[in-house]
Amino acid sequence: MKNIILFGAPGCGKGTQASKLVERYSLIHTSTGDLLRAEIKNKTELGRKAQVFMKKGELVADEVVIGMINNKINNNKTAKGFIFDGFPRTVKQAIALDKLLEKLEKPIVKTLMIKVKEEELTRRLKNRAIEQNRPDDQNEEVIQNRIKIYLEKTLPVADYYTKQNKLVEIKGEGTVDDIFERISKQLLS
C-alpha cells in the first residue's frame, strides 16, 4: 500500500494532481472536506459531531476527522493506497494521522510538497475564482490571508515529515502534465 500526502499552499494544484494520481495509480483520494460532507449527509455519529463544531463556526476537532479517515480506510481495505489532500494541516494532525496509520500498519511513504511562488498562487486562485465560481478565491485580501495561515500553521508540517525523511519538494510551476510527471517520478523512486 502506498499512502501519500499531497501538500502545498492554496492554489498549488493539489486537487488537480490528486485526480491524475487516482487515475494513473488507482489510489483513493481522501479529502477531508469530502469526508465531512459525506458523513454529515449520511447522518453518521461522526457527521453529527462534526456539525456541532461547524454550526459554531469552529474547525472540526482532530479526533473527529481522524475517525472519518479511519472509516474511509476500513471501508477500502483492498485499496492500493490513499492520497491525503488537505490533511494534515497542523503538526498535531500529522502526529495523529501517523499514529492511526501505524496502528493499521499502513504508514505514509511520502509527503509530496508542491512548491509554487506566491505571485503564481495568487494568479491561480484568481483564475480558479472565475473558472469554478469560487467566491473564496475572488478577494485578494482573503487569498493573502489563506496563504499567511498556510505559512504559519501548515508549513511546519513539512519540517515534521522532513525529520522522517518522507518529504519531497516538487516544482509546482509549468504545465499540469509537467508537474504530474515530476510527481510520478517521485512515486516510482
Image (cartoon, grey):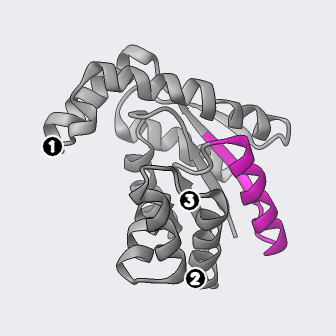
Badge 1 crowding class, 10 Å Cα cut-off, few under 14, some 14 to 19, many 20 or more, is: few
How much space separates mark 3 and mark 1, taking CA atoms? 25 Å
Q: In terms of sequence position, does the residue under pointer 2 or pointer 3 come before the other? A: 2
Marks 2 & 3, CB-CB < 8 Å contact: no
Is residue 53 depicted above or below 77 in this figure?
A: above
Q: Are marks 2 and 1 in contact (CB under 8 Å)?
A: no
Pick the front one: 82 or 50: 50
Q: Quadrant of residue 126?
A: top left
Image location (x, y in percent) of residue 165 = 83, 40
Q: Label 1, on which residue? A: 133
Task: Please give left or right for residue 124 compared with residue 11 in the image.
Answer: left
Residue denoted by label 2:
76
Give how far across and how far down residue 140 sits, in percent. Answer: 28, 20
Verify whether residue 152 appears in magenta.
no
Residue carrying label 3: 83
| Residue drawn at point x = 35 percent, y = 32 percent | 175
Is 5 above or below relative to 104?
A: above
Residue at the spot x=40%, y=49% of the render? 15
Q: Amino acid at mark 2?
A: Asn
Query: Which type of secondary structure does the marked residue at label 2 adopt?
Result: loop
Q: Give the Cα separation between the discs numbered 2 and 1.
A: 32 Å
For the residue marked with disc 1, what is the amino acid? Asn
**Left or right: 51 as drawn, with respect to 66:** left
**Which residue type does callout 3 highlight?**
Ile
* Magenta stretch bounds: 90-112
Foreground of the two, 177 or 59: 59
Local secondary structure at mark 1: loop
Query: In the image shown, does 33 or 167 lie closer to the viewer?
Result: 33
Residue at 24 percent across and 25 percent down: it is 139
Res 162 quadrant in image: top right
Q: Nearer the viewer, mark 3 or mark 1?
A: 1
